[in-house]
Image (cartoon, helix red, strand yellow):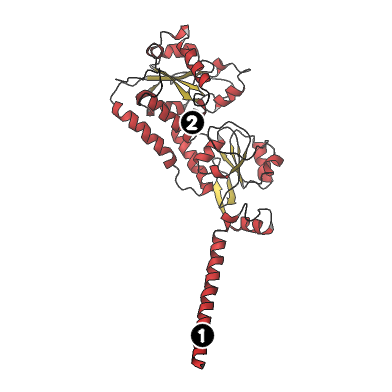
Amino acid sequence: MNQKSSILKALKWIVFNYIFLGILIVIGLVIAISPQLLGDVIPRHGTVGKWLAARNQMEVVDNQGTSMKVPDYVERVVTLGENTVDIVESAGGDYYIVASDGSSYASSVKINGRVEQTVDSIKSYDPQVVVASDTVPPSLVASLRSAGIPVFVYTKKDSLDGIIKTAQSMAKLFHEKDRSSAFSAYTRMVKKYVEPHKNDKKPVIALYNSSHGVYRSGIVRDMIETVHGIDGSGNLVISENGKDPNMLSDVWWYRDHKTTVDMTKSMGTKADLIRINPDVIFVPTRYLDKLPEYKQDVEAIMKDPDLQNLTAVKKGYVYPIHEMSLMSYSTKTFSAMEQMAKWLYGPSTYEGIVKYNGI
């Protein structure tokens, strides 16, 4: 009996040790994944939430060389500036955007709220980091940082490669090591369409909307060259005091102020388009979600008496392209480039549209 009692006692101690070890393991796991418990489970404003928020931090450097410390589990982001929502999406942080300032963006990311460009308004959303374009007033950036809110400022580079590098630099906020795959799928599709035509004569391509003019930027040039074309606007010389009209993102500004801005001083003119005489014209418009508007924009070119001698118009090589994607400075831009390749070399899916023949 005593022997049986001793065995049971020994088993109890063994079981107890395993249970104790299991509890320690569970506690360790909870601590390890505790950043993921923040938000709805553990209030960020409570004592535990604040302790967990301060426990793990990482250091990041924005595009302007400013170093800052942010939580290593950034999950609450406020975006400021045109295209910033799209860029954060490309960087892998789309699920964490809690508010934006209402600037234009092309993605379907759901934003929980809108902020004014003031410290109090932004602070009310308790962001762990604010992502802002370099067009945001430096005084606001400085005030946010003084209030203890990290601000990651990004600078746009006028090239397709610049789009990828911007997303890569921002991806560090979300522990995304490589975001190139987010762009490579579109690039592969472009190559798939273009490859059979690589020995064809390259068409001269222009992006033109009768309301805005001829689009010109490094991004446009890169897109056209990638789809095996020649950028017809490459030799245009356009200048405007105090503004650089060579960035696609500036077109947002032009559209917002088109009642007071003379577009002919900011972009290429109809006369420039006639001088270029492109083989293909892409028309930046809202054709994906506003069909009547896209048809009007295309017909404005096709029926313009001044443009009837253009090669593109005579052959019907005038195609719509989604302007919001084109100017989004993100994977959406690469999507627009894929659409270019489809119009040029893909199967015809639009009734009444004559497909370009590059031979």
Q: Residue at x 64, y 59 (%)?
A: 51
Going by the numbered disc 1, the residue's amino acid type is Leu
Q: Are marks 1 and 2 in contact (CB under 8 Å)?
A: no
Question: Furthest-front residue in view?
Answer: 1
Going by the numbered disc 2, the residue's amino acid type is Asp
Q: Residue at x 57, y 62 (%)?
A: 31
Q: Is residue 1 above or below residue 280?
A: below
Question: Furthest-right residue in view?
Answer: 120
Front label number (1 vs 2) = 1
Q: Tell me if I can see residue 209 in this picture.
A: no
Name the one closer to the observer, 74 or 64. Answer: 74
Q: Residue at x 46, y 38 (%)?
A: 164
Q: Where does residue 337 sit, x and y in percent of width and height?
A: 42, 29
The number of numbered badges drawn on the structure is: 2
Q: Is residue 121 above or below residue 289?
A: below
Question: Furthest-bottom residue in view?
Answer: 2
Whole-Å distance between the Cαs marked 1 and 2? 75 Å
Name the one closer to the observer, 162 or 25. Answer: 25
Q: Where does residue 315 sit, x and y in percent of width and height?
A: 37, 13
Q: Residues within 10 Å of mark 2 (few under 14, many from 20)?
A: some
Q: Secondary structure at mark 2?
A: loop
Name the one closer to the observer, 16 or 182. Answer: 16
Q: Tell me if I can see residue 329 in this picture.
A: yes
Q: Where does residue 156 sit, x and y in percent of width and height?
A: 52, 34
* Rendered image: mark on residue 8: 1
Q: Residues within 10 Å of mark 1 (few under 14, many from 20)?
A: few
Is 311 left or right of 211, judged from the image as shown? left
Q: Where does residue 206 sit, x and y in percent of width and height?
A: 43, 19
Name the one closer to the observer, 349 or 112. Answer: 349
Residue at numbered disc 2:
158
Q: Secondary structure at mark 1?
A: helix
